Amino acid sequence: MTKLKLLYVDDEKVNLTNFTIAFRTKYQIYTANSGQKALEIVKNNNDIAIIITDQRMPGMTGVELLQHIKKYNKDAIRIILTAYTEVADIIDSINKGHIYQYIVKPWVENDLLQVLDKASENFLLVRENKRLVQELEEDISERKRMENELRGLYKELQRLSVRLIEAQENERKRISMELHDDIGQNLIALKLQFNNFCFQLESSDKDKRQEAATIINSTLQRTLESTRTICQNLWPVIIEKFGFDLALKEFLDNFSRDYGIDVVLGSIHIQEYFSKHDQHQLYRILQEIVNNIGKHSGTEKIHFDTVNRADSLCIEITDFGCGFDMPDLAESQQEKGCLGLTTIRERVTILGGTIDIQSWREKGTRFTLLLPHSGALSTLP
Ligand SMILES: Nc1ncnc2c1ncn2[C@@H]1O[C@H](COP(=O)(O)OP(=O)(O)OP(=O)(O)O)[C@@H](O)[C@H]1O
Ligand SMILES: [Mg+2]
C-alpha cells in the first residue's frame, strides 16, 4: 500500500530529525523548519494527508500556518503541537475548524502514533466519501444527459413520423393527380378519338380513317409511357427485370433527357455486391440525390463516379450548380418540411454506410457515399 504523505513543521532541527526517524516507516515524510517553507511544500503537493506543526515558531505561529494551509489544502488533517500555556488560543482555533487536534509537548511516540493512525483513518474516509459523492454526481449528470438525449430523440421520432405520414399523403395526392391529369385525360381523349374513328369507318375516305387510327395510336403510346413513368416512380420494377446496373443507367439517361443535364458516367458494377433489399434502398438514395440536383442546382453537368473497394462501394456524385449552406438548410428544411435529405441519411444508416455532403455556394455540391458490400460477392474471400 502506498504511504500517506505527512508534513512535519518545527523550527528545531533536532525535532524534525527525531520525528522523521520515528515515523518514516509508516509515512512519506516532508519536513519544514518554518511556516513559509511549509506553505511552499503544501502548494507543490496537493495530496498531503496530515500536517503537524509546532505552535511556537518565529515569523508565523502554528495556528497561523494552519489557517493559511486550509486555503490550499482543505482535506489534510491539521494537528498542532503545543505547550500547556498556549492551549486557550488553540482551542479557539479548533472551534473555528482550522485544526483537527492538538497534542501537548513533549510528545510520546506511542501516543502520537495512535493519533496519527486515527488521523489517517479519518483522512482516508473523507477521501473515499468524496470520491463516492463525485462518482454519484457524475452518474446523475450522465443519466440526466442521457435522459435529455432520449427525450430529444423521441421528439425527433415524433416529428419524423408526422412528416412521413404527411409525405405519404402528398405522394398519394401526387399519384392521384398524375392518374387524373395524365392517364385520365388520355383515356378521355382516346374515347373521343375512338368515336371519331368509328365514325370515320362509315366514311369512304381512307386517309381520314388512317389519320384517326394514327391519332389513337399516338395517344395510346403516350398513355403507355405515362403509366410506365408512374410505375417506375412507385416501384422500380426495372431493377427486378433487368438488374440494378441497367435500371440506374436507364434512370440517369431519362434524367439527362428530361432536365437537359449532361451526366458524365463511368462503368457501373454495383448489383453483384448488394442484396436485393439494399439495391432498392440505394436506388432510392441515388434517385433523390439526382432529382435534387435537377430540381435545385441549376447545373449543366453531373459527374457520377463509382469505385468498388475490397469490401465497400464508394459513389461520388458532383454537380456544378448553385450549392447550399448546410446550417441554413437544417432550419429551412424544418420550416418547409423537406424530407429528401433526411430520408437519404436514414437509408444510408440502414445500409450501414456513411454519407458526406460538401457544398460550395455558386460552385456546386458533392455527395460521397461509402457503403459496405452486402450481396453475394461480398461474402467471397
Ligand atoms: N444538389 C443541390 N444543389 C443545391 N441545393 C440543393 C441540392 N440538393 C439539395 N439542395 C437543397 O437542400 C434542400 C433540401 O433538400 P431535400 O431533398 O431535403 O428537400 P426538397 O428537395 O426541397 O423537398 P423533398 O422533400 O421533396 O425532397 C433543398 O430544398 C435545396 O435547397
Ligand atoms: Mg428532395
Image: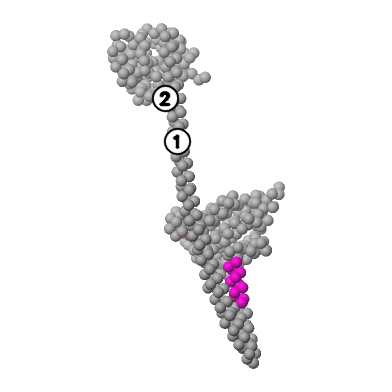
21 or 379, nearer to the observer? 379
Q: Residues within 10 Å of mark 1 (few under 14, many from 20)?
A: few
344 to the left or right of 45: right
Estimate the x, y position of residue 74 in percent, counting from the top left: 38, 24
**Residue at the spot x=45%, y=28% of the render?**
131
Q: How many marks?
A: 2
Q: Is mark 1 within 8 Å of ligand 1?
A: no
374 to the left or right of 119: right
For residue 14, above or below residue 342: above
For residue 191, above or below residue 78: below
**Residue at the spot x=58%, y=80% of the render?**
191
Residue carrying label 1:
140
**Snapshot quadrant of residue 39:** top left
Q: Nearer the viewer, mark 2 or mark 1?
A: 1
Tell me which segment is drawn in magenta.
220-231
**Residue at the spot x=51%, y=57% of the render?**
164
Residue 32 in view, yes or no: no
Q: Residues within 10 Å of mark 2 (few under 14, many from 20)?
A: some
> Which comes before the other along the chain, label 2 or label 1?
2
33 or 307, nearer to the observer? 307
Say the numbered circle drawn on residue 349: none
For residue 84, above or below residue 381: above
307 or 164, nearer to the observer? 164
**Residue at the spot x=62%, y=76% of the render?**
221
Q: Secondary structure at mark 1?
A: helix
Q: Which scheme is used to colour this image of the protein? A: one colour
- The disc labelled 1 sits on which kind of residue? Ile
- The disc labelled 2 sits on which kind of residue? Asn
- Distance, label 2 to label 1, CA atoms, is 27 Å
Say the numbered circle drawn on residue 46: 2
Estimate the x, y position of residue 153 in percent, counting from the top left: 48, 48
